[in-house]
Amino acid sequence: MATLKLQDIQGIIVRGYSNLDAACFVLLRIRDAAATRQWLSTLSDQIQNSQDRPAETCINIAFTFEGLKALGLDQQTLDTFPTEFKEGMTAPYKSRFLGDQGDNAPNLWDWGGTDSAPVHILLMLYAMDEVRLTTMYEALAGAFATGGIEQIRKLETFTLKDERGASREHFGFRDAIGQPIIEGLSRVGSPDNTIKAGEFILGYPNEYGLFTETPTVSAQHDRHNLLPNGQNGSREHDLGRNGSYLVFRQLSQKVQEFWRFLDGVTQKTDGASDSEARLKLAAKMVGRWPDGTPLVEAPDQDNSDMEDQNEFAYHHSDPYGFKCPFGAHIRRSNPRDSLDPQPGTQRSIAVNKTHRLLRRGRSYGKPVSPSLNPQEMLNTEASGERGLHFICISANISRQFEFVQQAWVNNPKFNGLYSDADPLIGDRGRNEEVSFDRFTVQATPVRQCVNGLPSFVQVRGGAYFFLPGINAIRFLASFS
């Protein structure tokens, strides 16, 4: 097992900063490359690494492909980045399999879209409270103009927690439970959920026992010798070592539409609401009860002893989807041991391990109801927007994020289904003749089909970012 160079790895890869409740994400555009490199040189010493846990504030930074171009990287270096990163998130063919069509089309996005100002830099700021966050942001923003950059947008966040202090998302469900464990860190867990570091961090072996493709620069361009030598005796210097890729998607959540739809399809014969049936159907769509209890372990009601439970599989305990439906959100996004070949075996788990994602997102917008009670969310008159800044980290955007979106989340035939996309975030249809708006609840003797699901999530913006190691940031600041 390779020793991780934590001092060179940006902290967001290793931890989600759960002790820092306040955060904002600042989208920047480079106007003057030379001035921006000088600004970056000053900022590089403030970037949070993975070795130290921040107590009060921290900063991480990432770059789009267009941002690296604007910063002045030469074409030879740019050509070494993987195709999916160079193409970005808005290529027309990607919009089809990512589900970015109709109301989610990139030309309608608030940022990062085809008709939006280009985003070059993502500045991620975290603090223990809003006062410290504001102070940090204002100090940084004061240097934007002299640093040759302009602010495109500042994305605020809002931390949602229940009475026990556990993270929740706007639909009311526990969040950030099913995270993979990076091999080589102090956190330990099930071997089935422990993933090789190279799946998330460039420069280390991945689940195939190989090194994921990494960007490189010629030795002559690394005049300060800031970067390590390339793999396998290459004369190139490794720009990607200890870095990764970050996928960012701003997802607006239609909270009241979600609960009102469920209320409508679970009403009693006399038209009265059935709160128990409504909650159960919501849990079936998610794959967990709101407190986090997995349905595969407790299909009939939540269990406080299991609300953090993540050590479970599907094939042997629920082969027919009677406990947790095949199309449930968490069963799609992490099928665990239910994949071919040989579901229920280590071969199946090995396949699953090559498609895992580290999630580092934050909610934004005030909740419809502070209590996150479904009945209150149904009846409250809410204004404003709320949702999730979805952030995930992977060493291979194509094999991890894009594969999960195409093959699992938006695949209407996932796991033997016919016209079901992910009930929460899936694409509802390709055209007027074909729609994937069904959710199937497997049961015996007769399955239940919920038809006419609307879209509960709308994409507001997004982009792919390169998340360099800290020495690579210093290289980018010195490059000329």
Image: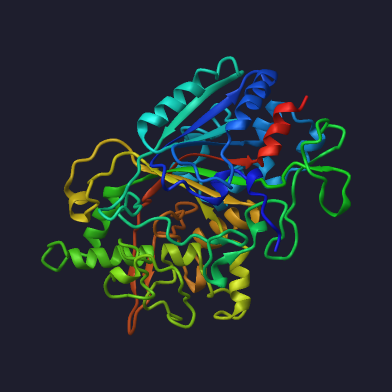
> Could you tell me residue 252's position as x and y percent?
39, 43
Instruction: Using the rendered image of the protein, determine whether residue 393 is visible from the camera's viewpoint.
Output: yes
Q: Residue at x 73, y 52 (%)?
A: 203
Q: The C terminus appears in which quarter of the rendering?
A: top right
> Could you tell me residue 74's position as x and y percent?
79, 30
Q: Residue at x 26, y 59 (%)?
A: 262
Q: To which quarter of the image does residue 72 belong?
A: top right
Q: Is residue 51 left or right of residue 18?
A: right
Q: Is residue 291 above or below residue 344?
A: above
Q: Is residue 382 above or below residue 411?
A: above
Single out the residue that lies furthest toward the top.
146
> Could you tell me residue 249's position as x and y percent?
49, 43
Q: Residue at x 63, y 25 (%)?
A: 42
Q: Is residue 387 above or below residue 311?
A: above
> Could you tell me residue 431's position as x and y percent?
48, 51
Q: To which quarter of the image does residue 138 belong?
A: top left
- Report the coloring of the rendering: rainbow
Numbered circles on residues, count: 0
Q: Using the image as rendered, state which of residue 147 and residue 71 is in the foreground.
A: 147
Q: Residue at x 50, y 73 (%)?
A: 416
Q: The N terminus appears in which quarter of the rendering?
A: bottom right
Q: Using the image as rendered, state which of residue 451 and residue 422 is in the foreground.
A: 422
Instruction: Using the rendered image of the protein, determine whether residue 90 is visible from the camera's viewpoint.
Output: no
Q: Is residue 140 left or right of residue 210?
A: left
Q: Is residue 408 left or right of residue 267?
A: right
Q: Is residue 364 above or below residue 186?
A: above
